[in-house]
Image (cartoon, grey):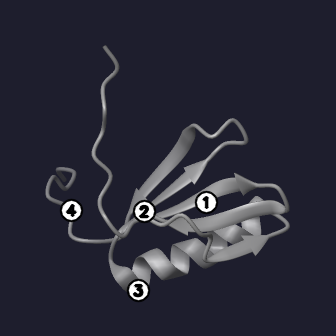
């Protein structure tokens, strides 16, 4: 049985799009922005996630999450 991870509502995702790369907010069906490169989309999404104090998920072309960053209050901060 697959493990289902909960994604914080309001988090941002950089996902593949037919016109390049898109930024989508969790729970949204429409992209909030479409960019020609993943780098451009990630830069914009990172800024938005920092302002919203939420998480950012960067997906690979396959759609799998390849990177995850948290810009909010971390319930389990690293030690030291």
- Element carrying mark 3: helix
Q: Is residue 50 above or below residue 18?
A: below
Question: x, y percentage for residue 53?
Answer: 33, 77
Q: Residue at image x 42%, y 62%?
A: 26
Q: Is residue 58 above or below residue 32?
A: above
Please tell me whether mark 4 or mark 3 is closer to you in this view. 3
| Nearest to N terminus: mark 2 or mark 3 | 2
| Nearest to N terminus: mark 4 or mark 1 | 1
Please tell me whether mark 4 or mark 2 is closer to you in this view. 2
Q: Label 3 neighbourhood size at 10 Å, few (<14), some (14-19), many (20+)?
A: few
Image disc number at residue 62 = none
- In this figure, which residue is indicated by the disc labeled 4? 74
Q: Quadrant of residue 9?
A: bottom left
Outermost front residue: 29
- Element carrying mark 1: strand
- In this figure, which residue is indicated by the disc labeled 2? 26
Front residue of this view, candidates 13 and 46 = 13
| Nearest to N terminus: mark 4 or mark 3 | 3
Please tell me whether mark 1 or mark 2 is closer to you in this view. 2
Answer yes or no: do the residues labelled 4 and 2 have beta carbons within 8 Å? no
Q: Residue at image x 69%, y 69%?
A: 41
| Nearest to N terminus: mark 1 or mark 3 | 1
Question: x, y percentage for residue 65?
Answer: 53, 42
- In this figure, which residue is indicated by the disc labeled 3? 51
């Amino acid at each position: 049985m697959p493990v289902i991870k909960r994604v914080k509502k309001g988090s941002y995702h950089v996902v593949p799009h037919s016109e390049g790369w898109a930024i989508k907010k969790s729970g949204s069906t429409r992209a909030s922005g479409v960019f020609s490169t993943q780098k451009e989309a990630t830069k914009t999404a990172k800024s938005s996630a920092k302002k919203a104090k939420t998480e950012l998920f960067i997906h690979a072309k396959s759609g799998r999450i390849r990177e995850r960053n948290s810009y909010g209050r971390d319930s389990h901060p690293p030690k030291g």
